[in-house]
Amino acid sequence: MRSIRLAGFVLGLVMAAVTAPRAGAEVAEPWVATDRTVDCSSLETIVRDVIKPEMTDEQKALALYHFFRQRVFHYKNLPESRIPLKTLNVMGNTLCGSQGTCMKGLLEAAGLKARVVCHTDGSHTFYEAFYDGGWHGFDTFANFYVYTRGEKPHIASFEELQKDPSLVKDAVAEKRAAPGLCHCGDDPMAFASGFKVLAYEPAKSAWNVKACALRKGEEIVRSWWPEGKPLPGSFSGKQAGPMHTCGGKDRDAEPFLFKFWEPYVIKNWSGVSNSFRHYANGRINYSPHLELGDHTDGMISARGIQHGAAGLSGEGEWIFPVKCSFYITGGALALEATCTEAGDAVEAFVSVDNGKVWAPVLSGKDSGKKEYKGVFDKDVAKAATGRHDYQVKLALKGKAVLHKILLQTIFSHNAMAAPHLMPGKNKVTLTAAAGADLKAAPLTVIYRYKEAPKWDGEVKIIEKTADANPFVFEADLPESEKLPQMQDLTIRCGTLAWTPEPAPSIQTAAAKPPAAPAAK
């Protein structure tokens, strides 16, 4: 348990009836990218990192095809699946129509014309890219494309396949097919049947994966592993969460793709013998130093309370927001408080409608210094469409004193889009919004991983604290044909005041996380 910083520091500032947030108290848009992975924060950064100047248009179409397949598997459609950046960063899975629509958005961002098409009977959807004067057919869902024959072969259009089905029938034998063609069991010959063009367009959204902020005493932790908190409504009842149910079929994918999935296999999980691709959780941990007044960073209001060496006291309330660019799937709260007289109490509530309705989380009124915990998953997790924000209200009654707080917000995200580390030298760049003062509110980057090839050793840690914006550092990993097994990536603002012993509902980056299974 981390001690509260006292060191003779006496604070006598009494907060007014309603106190406004301090200017510049939050660090907006904290983001980590590397020179060895694709920055998935925007279509522009994706195109910049995937497309090379010397590429032909066909090479551009293939590069985006492989980029998408590395990060997205087929599982289930959600209402926001046709927002390309949200599918890539948050969900990591969707079905055929949405995959084709997202690819249309990526291709158009790269300057290539594209269209979404389907079988005449509407049973399956895929897409075509237009370049070199003609259409060319792809399907990221089934892993399908084939080349034509001749001196200058090109990826065939679905019209060409319909006219000459042998282009599909003999593609594997003649070595003209995508590696691992339709390895999940789809029938390649179906692509030689009739098709029609659909008017599908990528959905427009103001959502931005970087639209978050860190207050002093707050951190965001992106894990590469599921931790039992998938988004409600995002998976079928027989699974533990979104996962590629074709399991071991991933081994038939191109080696340069399979190497990204291999370190994350979970064996015999939820009816799947080898789950290489699955949802992942993360956590936003918030534990400000109450004795220093850090709780005022980014708050909504504070009424009738004051901060001093012991924490917060005075009869009143403190209200603050929680914002997350990923889908919120749960939440937990731990408090340490002292009640001395009858009528003393500390109470916590959450609201998802800007304070119109407050759901109770916990109420502490036992005599003496006590620790209280509450879980509020059902109050903040919104099925299918997900939620990105909620509010917290802490109320003090009588002479109660609130010493410490740890608020944990659980979220679901796509770890395959996170900036993992690669063997060898990695140039890591931390950025924040223009004007962010990282000296007043320093950010720390923490990578935790296990080394290849067996991923059975101790967890390695790389930790750097930024003193500039942008902040660049080098992470040097051992050379290996296999990739490291990433555990999590943390961006922390200042220091967390309190990291209590973890319970099933309270976990922090400073505590030991659930053991990740080692791949064999």
Image: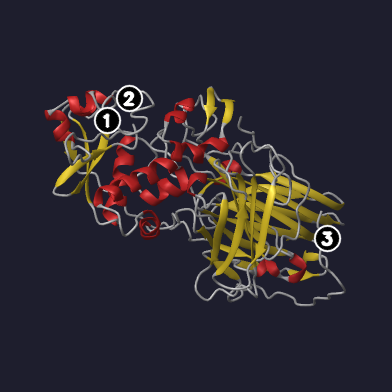
> Which callout, 3 or 1, points at the residue further toward the start of the chain?
3
What is the quadrant of the C terminus in the image?
A: top right
Whether residue 409 is visible, yes or no, is yes
Residue 124 numbered tag:
1
Indicate the amino acid at tag 3.
Ser
Which residue is located at x 55 percent, y 50 percent?
Answer: 422
- Look at the numbered discs 1 and 2 and tell me whether their residues touch, using CB distance below 8 Å: yes
Distance of label 3 from label 1 (alpha carbons): 59 Å
In the picture as drawn, the residue positioned furthest to the front comes out as: 151
Residue 386 seen in the figure: no
Q: What residue type is labelled 2?
A: Asp
Q: Which of marks 2 and 3 is in front?
A: 2
Disc 3 on helix, strand or loop?
A: loop
Q: Residue at x 23, y 24 (%)?
A: 170
State the image coordinates of residue 299 (x, y, percent, origin top left). Answer: 61, 66
> Is 74 above or below relative to 312?
above
Q: Is residue 386 above or below residue 188?
A: below
Is 208 on the left or on the right of 367, as rendered? left
Identify which residue is drawn at 82% across, 53% down: 1
Q: Mark 2 points at which residue?
A: 186
**What residue type is disc 1 on?**
His
Q: Quick one: 499 or 301, which is closer to the camera?
A: 499
Q: Which of marks 1 and 2 is in front?
A: 2
Disc 2 on helix, strand or loop? loop
Q: Return the disc, 2 or 3, that comes first in the chain's sequence.
A: 3
Residue drawn at x 57%, y 52% is 424
* 35 sits left or right of 67 in the view: right
The image shows residue 247 at horizontal and vertical percentages of: 48, 27
Query: Which quadrant of the structure image shows residue 436?
Result: bottom right
Q: Name the residue under label 3.
A: 3
State the image coordinates of residue 35 (x, y, percent, origin top left).
49, 58
